[in-house]
Image (tube, rainbow, N blue to C red):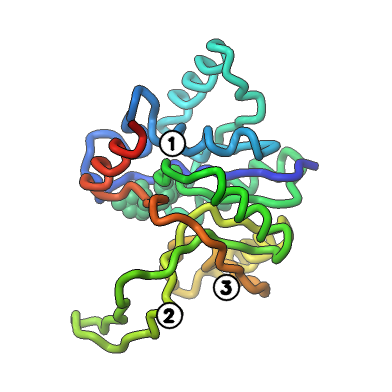
Amino acid sequence: MNRIGVLVLAAGKGTRMNSQIPKQFLEINGKPIFMHSSDKFLSVADVVCVVTNEEHLAFMQALLEHDAHMGKNVKNVIITAGGRERWESSVNGLRALEELGGCDYVLIHDAARCLVDEETIGRVIEDTVTYGAAVAAVPSKDTIKIADENGFVRSTPDRERCWIIQTPQGFSWEVITSAYRNLRENGNGGLNITDDAMVVENFGNHPVRLTPGSYENIKVTTPEDLIYVKEKLK
Ligand code: CTP
Ligand code: MG
């Protein structure tokens, strides 16, 4: 069994980016965004599973073979196909790790967060081992408001308790697989699932630790994010 498995989720369509190819394949300094992300985990993971769109599997495989040919150590990298929703991509990735015998701990990371730093990864791993579930997070600088269906303010949560949630998110194998098993068996109850911690919160039975992340660890989502990321990766 592997100790640490990492899922790098790169199977989205990137609709808000509005680019010709999904955002995770856009290149910065000659390297696709998803690879800036996955490379950050190579030294800490026993296996890195890049989850990608069905139609990009062959392209990914070719990239991997090219890297191996160029002498990069990608022996612990595997590729699998994602699903329609982000959480379905996580399910597929977990299945791929299971086929390799499972892991003690799984880190799940958005391919679009290519500025993730080693310190954040280290802190999430440490808290995952200690608490069983941990997500990178930063205190919200802005006041958050909850809206009603009509675009009016319903309420304002205490800002001191508001956190911006990032990835990586780490879980013990049992915590994440049992939560996803419950979700698959009982359906998502109409919930819009936007991260893996939500699956543990709603379908699991384990507290999730907030681990200090970094304000720089943004998710490349819209075109102006690219300007920031290009500047940072210079
Ligand atoms: N993702 C995935 N599978 C999906 C949807 C999303 O692996 N079915 C991945 C994306 O590739 C991204 C991460 O999850 O790295 C975070 O998702 P998001 O930023 O929402 O990316 P997209 O869904 O691709 O973008 P959009 O919502 O604008 O279409
Ligand atoms: Mg999305």
Q: Which residue is mark 1?
A: 34
Q: Earlier in the sequence, mark 2 or mark 1?
A: 1
Q: Earlier in the sequence, mark 3 or mark 2?
A: 2
Q: Earlier in the sequence, mark 3 or mark 1?
A: 1
Kind of residue at disc 3: Glu
- Residue 226 position by quadrant: top left
Residue at far top of view: 69
Q: Which residue is mark 3?
A: 201
Front of the two marks 3 and 2? 2
Residue visible at 57% across and 52% down? 91
Residue visible at 55% across and 43% down? 118
Callout 3–callout 2 Cβ contact below 8 Å: no
Q: Classify the position of the C terminus by image quarter.
A: top left
Q: Residue 107 shows which numbered tag?
A: none
Taking 168 as reference, is 139 left or right?
A: left
Residue 7 visible in the picture: yes
Q: Residues within 10 Å of mark 2 (few under 14, many from 20)?
A: few
Kind of residue at disc 2: Glu
Residue 11 visible in the picture: no
The local secondary structure at tag 3 comes to helix
Q: Which residue is mark 2?
A: 160
Kind of residue at disc 1: Phe
Q: Residues within 10 Å of mark 3 (few under 14, many from 20)?
A: few
Taking 145 as reference, is 58 left or right?
A: right
Callout 2–callout 1 Cβ contact below 8 Å: no
**Mark 3 vs mark 2, CA separation in Å:** 20 Å
Residue visible at 56% across and 33% down? 79
